[in-house]
Amino acid sequence: MLRSTIIDAIGQTPLVKLRLDENAIGPVYAKLEMMNLFGMKDRVAKKIILEAKRDGILPDGAPIIESSSGTMALGVALVGTYLGHPVHIVTDPRIDLITLRKLESLGCQIHVVEKMTGRGWQSARLERLHDLLEQYPGAFWPRQYENPNNPLAYAALAKELLDDIGRVDILVASVGSGGSLCGTAQELLKYNPELRVVAVDSVGSVIFGQPDNPKRLQSGLGNSLVAPNVNHELVDEVHWLSDEQAFTATLELAKHEKVFAGNSSGSVYAVARWLSSQVSPETNIVGIFPDRGDRYFQTIYDEQYRRDKDINSSVPLSQPAKVSYQSVVTSWSYAAVKRGNRREKAPALR
């Protein structure tokens, strides 16, 4: 399939039907966003940067500065440097070696903050980013957490899903900046107002009202702040998984489905697989799988690391506990999200 430029190769990722387990009833389809050049956020970087150039916000050759410890950094590096922009990435010590080497190879300037500030690593990175904006007047900040072109980038993903399977009844996706879940859901709701939207978060993330734990081991989902692009009005239900449960699900995903992914994908897999046992056979469930496993080779996939962090991945996942939305959770739990009257009803779970 010929593409004129490397940027044109972003999108049109595979959709794969999973085999699941003996409890499965409804089909689950995995949208393998990890199969983009560097990951799911390639879509976001492409949309934000190209729109900024069209609007005259990003002149030719102007620097681009973004805060990220993962796939957004890689997406910005890919698109920005390809189009001739100096790219500065502000990150923190949690960045994995593979991502760091990829960023270096793409020609980025990388700024690593040394310690957390008042609101964890996120606030420390943003403080450093503002210092760089003063240092480089005229630089462009993509603002992935609040830029509306982040969720808008996923309209294309939603249309790819509809082209492939015709109808999506339940959408399951992890939440960090809010772009992929909310952007995909917003577009799918135009075609199916009864779409059920299920968010996947981590224990210790504040996005859906939990107390913050900035030392949580999961990365790629969850946050120590609530990004403006997280539209709670679109979400019907949220699931929180602990570090141990997310790691276990990620290892099961690799072993059973042969998808070598990160913990965001692993958590989505666990939730989608459980949901498949609660619905009718006609219910199409789609999970968005955003992250590859290579950046986790020294953590999730390293037995010694798991032992050091007291992660026992040999214990099978239990069933999630249903809780009220304001309950503080420490293990896999789910709750209905209080929101406005987006629609009258959604596909019922049995």
Image (tube, rainbow, N blue to C red):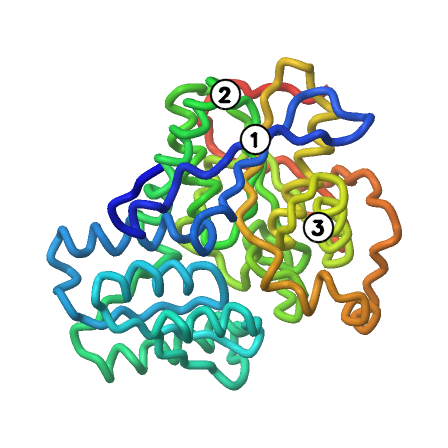
- Judged from the image, the secondary structure of the residue bearing numbered disc 1 is strand
Of mark 3 and mark 2, the one earlier in the sequence is 2
Q: Kindly identify the residue that appears in the image at 39 percent across and 41 percent down.
A: 11
Of mark 2 and mark 1, the one earlier in the sequence is 2
Q: Position of residue 239 (x, y in %)?
A: 66, 43
Residue 203 versus residue 288: which sits nearer the camera? 288
* Contact flag, marks 3 and 2 (Cβ < 8 Å): no
The image quarter containing residue 313 is bottom right
Mark 3 → mark 2, Cα distance in angstroms: 25 Å
Q: Position of residue 88 (x, y in %)?
A: 33, 74
Of mark 3 and mark 1, the one earlier in the sequence is 3
Q: Position of residue 290 (x, y in %)?
A: 53, 48
Q: Kindly identify the residue that appears in the image at 46 percent across and 78 percent down.
A: 124
Q: Is residue 320 above or below residue 178?
A: above
What label sits on residue 250 in the rendered view? 3
Q: Kindly identify the residue that appears in the image at 87 percent across and 53 percent down.
A: 314
* Contact flag, marks 2 and 1 (Cβ < 8 Å): yes
Residue 237 versus residue 274: which sits nearer the camera? 274
What label sits on residue 165 in the rendered view? 2
- Judged from the image, the secondary structure of the residue bearing numbered disc 2 is helix
Q: Kindly identify the residue that appears in the image at 53 percent across and 37 percent down.
A: 31
* Contact flag, marks 3 and 1 (Cβ < 8 Å): no
Q: Which residue is under mark 1?
A: 286
Q: Residues within 10 Å of mark 1 (few under 14, many from 20)?
A: many
Q: Is residue 146 above or below residue 319?
A: below
Mark 2 → mark 1, Cα distance in angstroms: 10 Å
Farthest residue to the front: give it: 2
- Judged from the image, the secondary structure of the residue bearing numbered disc 3 is helix
What label sits on residue 126 in the rendered view? none
